[in-house]
Amino acid sequence: MELKDIYENINLKSLIIGAALFAFIVVLATEYNLDILLIFSSVGLLYIGYGSRNKLQSVVLGAIGTLPLFIATVFFERLGPITGENITLLILISFLAIGAFCGFTGFYFSENRKKAIGQ
């Protein structure tokens, strides 16, 4: 697997829709205290991974898909006030890890579906 496998044939539709869906659901759930909606926020990241071409691309794009929520959290404080010195870096690392995991899981679902249809 080469570096060009990450940036070639990116499904921009799934990246934009997935990132927007992820950020929108989280902000909506925290704004109106609808905690049950937070469960469904990973749907956007799974959609990003589902539309990816390979494992590495799904992990990278899943992590990139969390950046809109990171920006809304850190710079606009949409999820509440942020206190502490290192908290911004910890928020970024946790968002990237969640995005990478969900992106890979979405790709895994896509591959299993293709295998099941092929049998």
Image (spheres, rainbow, N blue to C red):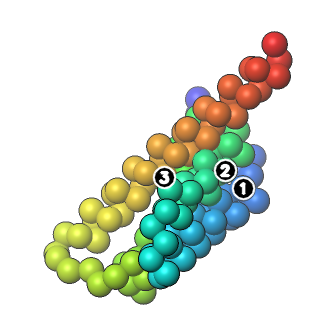
Residue visible at 47% across and 82% down? 31
Residue 89 in the image: state x and y as whole percent. 28, 66
Mark 2: secondary structure: helix
When asked about the image quadrant of residue 80, the answer is bottom left
Q: Secondary structure at mark 1?
A: helix
Q: Is residue 41 left or right of residue 75?
A: right
Q: Is residue 73 left or right of residue 108?
A: left
Which residue is located at x 49 percent, y 72 percent?
Answer: 34
Q: Of helix, strand and loop, which one carries label 3?
A: helix
Query: Which residue lies at the image location 63% right of the left edge and 69% below the top edge?
Result: 20
Give the amino acid at mark 1.
Ser
Q: Give the labeled residue for mark 3.
A: 99
Q: Which label was assigned to residue 63?
A: none
* Mark pair 3, 1: CA separation: 14 Å
- Could you tell which of marks 2 and 1 lies nearer the N-terminus? 1
The answer to whether residue 81 is above or below residue 27 is: below
Q: Is residue 18 above or below residue 83?
A: above
Q: Quadrant of the N terminus?
A: top right
Task: Confirm or deny contact between disc 2 and disc 1 (CB under 8 A).
Answer: yes
Give the image location of residue 49, x and y in percent.
62, 45
Question: Going 76% across and 59% down the picture, which residue do you hit?
Answer: 13
Which residue does the numbered mark 1 point to in the structure image?
14
Q: Residues within 10 Å of mark 1 (few under 14, many from 20)?
A: many
Which amino acid, by three-letter code, is at mark 2? Tyr
Dot 3 alpha-carbon crowd within 10 angstroms: few under 14, some 14 to 19, many 20 or more: many
Q: Badges 3 and 1: C-beta atoms under 8 Å apart?
A: no
- Crowding at mark 2 (Cα within 10 Å: few <14, some 14-19, many 20+): many
Task: Judge left or right: residue 75 versus residue 6.
Answer: left
Please name the residue that numbered disc 2 is placed on.
Answer: 47
